[in-house]
Every structure is written in C-alpha cells, then in structure tokens.
C-alpha cells in the first residue's frame, strides 16, 4: 500500500464516529492487513486431511488473532520437492512446512526413529510414543537444528506397498523390485535389506514414474494412494504395514521467535487441535480405503510380517539402525513397542 493510500484510509478510519471502542481498531486493522503472514508449504493434494485441517487451523488463527496473523497454504509441491521446502523453511524463505519424519532425517537423523521397520503395531503405541517421551526427544533434536515444531504430530499412516507386477506375499517377492521410496536413508536401507532395488524420488514424481515404468512399485499409506490416484497406475496393493509415518509441523525458528507470545499460543493451539481431528480423519479414511481401492481396480492382499522381519534381522538392519539412532532414542522406542534388536 502506498503511504498516500494508507494515510487516506487512516483518516477515513479516524473519521468514523466513536460508535464504540470495538469498531475502531477493527477498521484500522482491516485496512492495514495482517501483521504476520506465514507461508506454509506441503507435498499433498488439497483433498488430503492434512490440507483440509490445516485450512481449518488457518481460519481459526485468523479469527482468534482478529486478522493479525495469516497462514497461506501452498499445497501439492507448489513450492518444490520436500528437500527444497526443508531448505526453505530453514533459511526463512517459508515459515512453515510439514515434512514426513523420513524427510527431516536427511537433516536430523534421529527424527526418523518412528519409521523403523515393523516397530509399531497399532495407533495406541504410535500416539503413546509420539505424544510422549519419544516425540519430545525428537522435537528437541529438531530445535537444536534450528527448527521449531508444534507438539502434536499429524498422521500420514502405516505405509503399504503397491506394485504393477504382482502382489507381495512374503519378503521373497521383494527381490529386485524397482520401488520408489521418499528421500530417506532409512527407507533406502530397509528396502535394500529386504532385497529390493529402491530409488529415492520426490513425491511429485511418483505418479509419472509409475506411469512410465521408471519404477514398478511405491509404498505409501492408503489415503495417499487414494488422493494421489496412484490406483490408476498400479494393480496390486499389499498391506505390508511396514512402517508408521507422520508429519511434523515445523517452523522457521527466527519467524517463530518474532511472533508475540499471544499469537504463538493461538497458533499452536489451533494446529495442535486440528492435528487431533486430522488423525481421526485419517483413521476413518483407512477404514473405508480397502473397499474403495478394490472398487477402483486394485487387487488387495494381507501378507504376514514374519518373513519381512526375519529378512531385516538377517540383513543386520536393526543392529545398524540402533547404532545410527543412538541408545537413547532406541530405548524410548522400545519402551513403546518392546524389544526390537
Ligand atoms: O513422499 C511420500 O511418499 C509421502 C507423501 O508419504 C511423504 O511425505 C513421505
């Protein structure tokens, strides 16, 4: 806004009769726009609960802050791939980003601890750990690397395997499988341990690389298979439940510290409350997903986890990652899921 325009508006506002103390600041504020604008990038289509509930949180923040704070959402990799957005949120090019824990681990290795293969067996274990000591441990590690985060993690889900060339019924079927995984050392190592031939690609490239057979398989939770329409380019879906994955809501540290305490409170309340609703949305989507994906042509099977776990043990996967994550993180994980290695 030009100075002239601002002055004209201020004068107009000042000229409003004193109809009550409430009306006056509202007019000035509406004319001058929000004091704090946070750009928030993510990698998912607008239809995913992550975006639906983030928009809800953004609306709540706008209202509760009386227009002082605005969150602008850039979904669907509009601002680049995950590793680009991670760099941007660190430099301050954007203020917020929701990377999967798998992706944050390229910067802070211990963050991927929740995604150790076949560790969590249900959501009670997951939220117990992530809303408890394990989550707190990881958030402190991110903070040391310059990333603030909201307390509640958002759900991505248990990852399942889809392919174009046959179902995965045991670890045997993983042999030589050309499978796309996220940009994540843990995912690469785990699929190598299972005998597959994994490739890291940004999420924005998954559909086209399946379509053109650069890879024959990918692994993601069912709601993502739905919203990204991966069933159009895959034939089989094997419910391998091989890792649980979630999104951290991370913030640029300087931008967060510049925010006045009252706005920090409004923003974290809104995002933490929306996180709980988002988890519930994903739970409901998961319940209906198998039938929905079958009706869209995917053939679904449920392999037992035993052969996969055995292959990973034999490959030394658990021993190796216990070492990489460190005893403290590993112990906290085992407190929730039992002995792993
Ligand atoms: O890239 C993926 O596979 C996704 C969408 O699950 C993540 O964000 C890790």
Image (tube, helix red, strand yellow):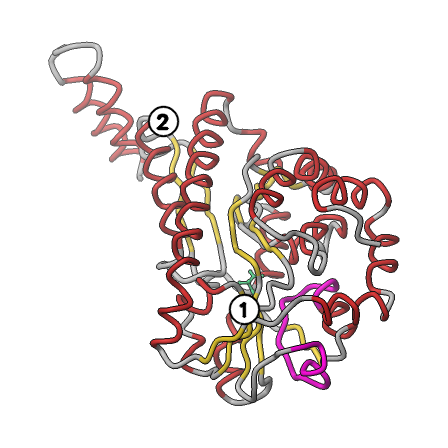
- Picture coordinates of residue 65 (x, y %)? 36, 26
- Give the number of the mark in front: 1 or 2: 1
Q: Is residue 44 left or right of residue 170?
A: left
Q: Residue at x 57, y 34 (%)?
A: 151
- The numbered dot on residue 203 is 1
Does mark 1 have its CB less than 8 Å from ligand 1?
yes
Residue beneath disc 2: 65
Q: Say if residue 96 shows up in the picture.
A: yes
Q: Residues within 10 Å of mark 2 (few under 14, many from 20)?
A: some
- Picture coordinates of residue 209 (x, y %)? 54, 82
Q: Is 179 a magenta residue?
A: yes
Q: Earlier in the sequence, mark 1 or mark 2?
A: 2
Instruction: Tell me the SS state at disc 2.
Output: loop
Quadrant of the drawing holding the C terminus: bottom right
Q: Which residues are magenta?
A: 170-187
Q: Say if residue 50 shows up in the picture.
A: no
Q: Nearer the viewer, residue 322 or 15?
A: 322
- Picture coordinates of residue 156 (x, y %)? 52, 55
Q: Is residue 324 above or below residue 150?
A: below
Q: Residue at x 79, y 53 (%)?
A: 340
């Amino acid at each position: 806004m030009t100075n002239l325009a601002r002055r004209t508006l201020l004068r107009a506002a000042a000229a409003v009769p004193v109809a009550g103390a409430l009306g006056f600041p509202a007019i000035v504020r509406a004319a001058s726009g929000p004091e704090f604008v946070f750009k928030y990038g993510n990698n998912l289509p607008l239809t995913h609960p992550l975006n639906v509930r983030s928009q809800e949180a953004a609306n709540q923040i706008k209202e509760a802050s009386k227009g002082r704070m605005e969150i602008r959402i850039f979904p669907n990799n509009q601002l680049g791939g995950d590793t680009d957005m991670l760099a941007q949120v660190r430099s301050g090019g954007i203020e917020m980003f929701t990377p999967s824990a798998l992706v944050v681990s390229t910067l802070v290795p211990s963050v991927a601890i929740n995604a150790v293969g076949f560790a969590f067996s249900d959501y009670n274990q997951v939220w117990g750990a992530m809303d408890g000591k394990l989550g707190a441990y990881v958030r402190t590690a991110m903070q040391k690397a310059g990333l603030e985060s909201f307390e509640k993690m958002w759900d991505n889900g248990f990852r399942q395997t889809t392919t174009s060339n046959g179902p995965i019924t045991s670890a045997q079927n993983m042999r030589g499988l050309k499978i796309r995984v996220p940009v994540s050392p843990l995912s690469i190592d785990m699929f190598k341990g299972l005998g597959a031939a994994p490739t890291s690609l940004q999420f924005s490239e998954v559909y086209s690389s399946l379509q053109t057979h650069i890879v024959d398989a990918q692994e993601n939770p069912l709601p993502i298979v739905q919203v990204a329409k991966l069933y159009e380019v895959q034939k089989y879906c094997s419910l391998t439940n091989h890792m649980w994955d979630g999104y951290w809501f991370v913030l640029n540290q300087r931008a967060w510290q510049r925010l006045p305490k009252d706005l920090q409170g409004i923003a974290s309340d809104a995002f933490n409350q929306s996180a709980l609703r988002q988890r519930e949305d994903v739970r409901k989507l998961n319940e209906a997903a198998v039938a929905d994906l079958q009706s869209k042509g995917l053939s679904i099977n449920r392999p037992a986890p035993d052969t996969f776990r055995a292959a990973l043990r034999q490959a030394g996967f658990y021993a190796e990652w216990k070492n990489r994550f460190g005893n403290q993180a590993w112990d906290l994980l085992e407190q929730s899921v039992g002995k792993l290695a």
